[in-house]
Image (spheres, rainbow, N blue to C red):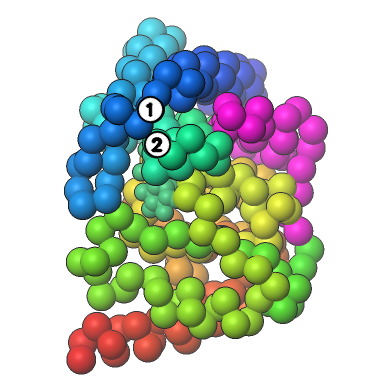
Amino acid sequence: MSPEELQSAGAFAEATAREAGVVLMQHHRSVPQGEVRLKGVRDPVTDADLASERLIVSRLRERYPETAIFAEEETRETAAGLTWYVDPLDGTVNFSQSHPFFAVSIALYHDARPLVGVVHAPALDETFTAEAGGGTRFNGAPAAVSDKRALIDAVLATGFAYGRQDYDDDNVARFADMVLRVRGLRRAGSAALDLAYTAVGRLDGYWEPHLNSFDVAAGALLVREAGGVVTDLDGGDTWLDGRSILAAGPGLHAVMQATLAAAAVGIRRKGQA
Ligand code: IPD
Ligand code: CA
Ligand code: CA
């Protein structure tokens, strides 16, 4: 992709995320509670998730008919080369409670290489954008990860998968260990926004197991382009499809990884007992 094509894809993804945000806010104001259905014991989907995804998919299809789209609810295409990753509403539990911490997440990848990432939080009027090599922007202004180096100074975030009752690794032991070491630890309910907040230094780091590519694809590029480090929980590079992610500023990533890995040894032993 040429620099012009990259910029044009970034602008189009942002415009599409904003349009989807308008759709979400229309549903948000019109009694979301009645629309909530469950995909699992606590995994909600609303009409807003579907309306947002249909809008995004139709816009991307029209402009980029050759590009695969891997979205959460209805459109799961895989192909070599270019792919759009779409979470039409990240933070559905928050949305269904009228809690404003939710977002639209759209990313463009070439295989495992991030090209474009947009996270747009319509109820907060906050938009985070990045194109590969161009830095991260928060509501249009350049943004950077925090430079913290010590856990005791850090405010981190994490999350817990909907199916946690079925996992040996429910992330509770990591949480219990880390909460005693840091200034603050948040579970705010949107992986895409947790990553975006890490990119702009509102959070100093974030980790979560059991995620999907559409949860993290955009946010991971935001963190990287803001000078941060993104790996999986083992320090490897499988964060897009490997289901776990660890993102932080360069001063904190290594200590977070070592601390979480030590806590995870306990988790696995507990799971095997
Ligand atoms: C969820 C959110 C949440 C995370 C879950 C995700 P959804 O996505 O990102 O913060 O902890 O693992 O599944 O269902 O609201 O799109
Ligand atoms: Ca999600
Ligand atoms: Ca979602």
Q: Is residue 174 above or below residue 218?
A: below
The answer to whether the residues at label 1 and label 2 have Cβ atoms under 8 Å apart is yes
The answer to whether residue 124 is visible is yes
Q: Is residue 109 above or below residue 272?
A: above
Residue 219 location (% of width, % of height): 54, 44
Question: Does the magenta segment cover residue 256?
Answer: no
Residue 200 location (% of width, % of height): 71, 47
Q: Going from the N terminus, do you reach mark 1 or mark 2 first?
A: 1
Residue plotted at (20% across, 42% down): 39
Q: Residue 80 versus residue 136: which sits nearer the camera? A: 136
Question: Which residue corresponds to mark 1?
Answer: 32
Residue plotted at (67% across, 57% down): 203
Question: Which residue corresponds to mark 2?
Answer: 96
Q: Secondary structure at mark 1?
A: helix
**Badge 2, how many Cα within 10 Å: few under 14, some, many 20+?**
many
Residue 81 location (% of width, % of height): 37, 33
Q: Is residue 142 above or below residue 271?
A: above
Q: Secondary structure at mark 2?
A: helix
Q: Residue 67 versus residue 208: which sits nearer the camera? A: 208
Q: Is residue 103 left or right of residue 145?
A: left
What is the three-letter code of the residue carrying label 1?
A: Pro
Q: Answer yes or no: disc 1 within 8 Å of ligand 1.
A: no
Q: Residue 35 versus residue 65: which sits nearer the camera? A: 35
Name the quadrant containing residue 14. top right
Residue 124 location (% of width, % of height): 64, 32
The answer to whether residue 67 is visible is no
What is the three-letter code of the residue carrying label 2?
A: Ser
Label 1, label 2: how many angstroms apart (C-alpha)? 6 Å
The part of the chain drawn in magenta is 118-146
Q: Residue 123 versus residue 197: which sits nearer the camera? A: 123
